[in-house]
Amino acid sequence: MKYLTKSKFKMALECPTKLYYNEHKDKYANSSLDDPFLKALASGGFQVGELSKCYYPGGHDIQELDYETSEKKTMKLLEQENVVIFEAAIRYKNLFIRIDILEKIGDTLNLIEVKSKSAHPDTFDSEIWNSRELKKNIKSLKSTWKPYIYDVAFQSFVLKNAFPNMNIGNFLMCADKSAVATTDGLNQKFFLSTDDRGRSYAEIKGDVSLEALGDQILCKIDLNEPVNIIHNDQEMSERFNGLGFEKAIWKFAKNLEADTKIKAEVSSNCKSCEFKSCEEDKLSGFNECWNLSHGLTQEELEKPFVFDVWNYRGSQKALDSGKIFIEDLELTDFNATPRSGGDGLSNGERQVLQVEKVQNNDPTSYVDVFGLGQEMATWKFPLHMIDFETCMVGIPFNKGQRPYEQIAFQFSHHIIHADGSIEHANEYINSTPGFHPNFEFVRQLKDALGTEGSIFRYSNHENTVLCQIREQLIKSSATDKGALIEFIETVTNKKQGKKFLWQGERNMIDLCEMVKKYYYSPLTKGSNSIKFVLPAILNESEYIKNKYSRPIYGKNKEINSKNFEEQTWISTSPCGEVINPYKCLPPVFDKWDFEELELVMSDSDIANGGAALTAYAMMQFTHMSDQEREKVRCALLRYCELDTFAMVMIWEHWNDLVKGQEEEDAA
């Protein structure tokens, strides 16, 4: 029998058609790397899950994997008047769930779902509902919480039907935003390991008694009201095409058992479909859905869709009006109002530019050389390119810290001097387990950046991180916190509403914003990620091609590197395209390269930097030999160094264009 489990229900909630594609992994390509070990590691889910068990001493852990044995063991334990069961296996017809924590107290069963997400217990109820709809007395869950609450609702449905004479309580346990750790080294008490069968498990180190754990940093939130609203079909964000909650469950289960596909309701959500990819010997589920829904040919399926337009929030409206491809869009579909003062492209103008490039089959890039030149003329040498790698762990390193506080564990720093010389000048990485690196990170960064020259970041991440560390410093007893806070305020900005609390004299310049305003290449396909912008520039810039087709980058080379011995950045594919340098990085581990590690987090709350934070978590929370740890450390150093050198090459390309225009104007 094929069971509809909670993970499959979650998939069906995203798109019911995925149930069929997922059951036929040998037939359909899947771009996501479904590795529970890595996902648990990167999100910190295994630690939060194991800590939650510690709050219920004496609980029974169901470790059996097969359905029948785990269910029998669960039912035997439930014969007791009062009992706590971890991973309780419950079946009702062809529905099967494993409940993180099941607490039986007399005739009451409390279902407790544990998530590595944070919430404030006092404001949770107001955070989960769409406020605009609530004013109309309509209950509609916010997308940020919807999957978690529907997960509990599905489990509750199974539990209620399996035990119709019991009272069911529904709860979510997650990191408490209002809590503060009262003990040091809490997160080093839980390590992630794999057994001889390859199954992941949490290994406890040291004392995990309630006294040793200190004040609780996880909170148990009552979900009875939202779950009942869902069960009564009064939750309006999900209508299951008119079926309602219960009928939808049985439809999913029926089609799963019969191995039949539920017809797809294609929409703008298809943009992130993991079955969109196509491999040589496997089919594309995305293509199959759109072919069945709209009769698209293979040639049409290769065209860019309306949801491929950068930051376009009108894609669903366009689809509803019959516009499927970018070539179908019109100027009236966008608000292309220019920026005030003509300061580069507005968002709407950039969207129109992307559409026009597609419609005119124009492969050339757009560069506002004049606008770039004006901006670049204000920059002061030496130019500092910096990039951070960070993570947020559910269980704090030290007492006094809250769950999911920012941890900055690595930076890279390139310098461009006034004479045009370039060097990878500084870097920092913490690979010591249990050490909280933030303040040392800022000390090293302060020394690296000195007091002269413009500083550059790519996107707002670095500014956000430093402002968060500033808050940590204010609460700390660090003897040099005054100097570190002053440094942070010098290189960052902080807004409160529309007003700036401060703007530093050397406030970091955002190269990503420069890209958005002054540069667009069709090769990026609308993305502004540095991992798309860099290969676009490498393919377009003759200056960069000529310079870096030689091995001038490395230790003791023309451009000094701290981590590459001798690197030629320009290499071409058989069709003549420059290969993305990120694809050429050596793997972090024998099994996974950086691209694969990024895919681990593609369907989670962690958006960017999944590869680096997964590798860092591996060094922090798994058993590694010194040799293995050094290998991961070196891979991380190369990865971060490429991020800042990518910024260097972007600057070099723009500088070459600006100089060329100046020479042309002078002639």
Image (spheres, helix red, strand yellow):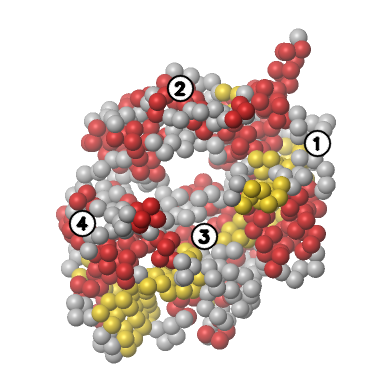
Per the image, the residue denoted by label 2 is: 356
Q: Determine whether label 4 and label 3 are within 8 Å by CB.
A: no
Q: Residues within 10 Å of mark 1 (few under 14, many from 20)?
A: some
Q: Please state which amino acid type lies under the numbered disc 1.
A: Phe
Q: Please state which amino acid type lies under the numbered disc 2.
A: Glu
Element type where label 4 sits in the image: loop
Q: Please state which amino acid type lies under the numbered disc 4.
A: Gly
Q: Which residue ends up furthest to the top in the rendered image?
A: 667
Element type where label 3 sits in the image: helix
Please give the label number shown on residue 244. 4
Q: Determine whether label 1 and label 4 are within 8 Å by CB.
A: no
**Sequence-wise first label, 4 or 2:** 4
Numbered disc in front, either 4 or 3? 4
The x, y position of residue 335, in whole percent, is 46, 30
Please give the label number shown on residue 42. 3
The x, y position of residue 312, in whole percent, is 43, 36
Per the image, the residue denoted by label 1 is: 381
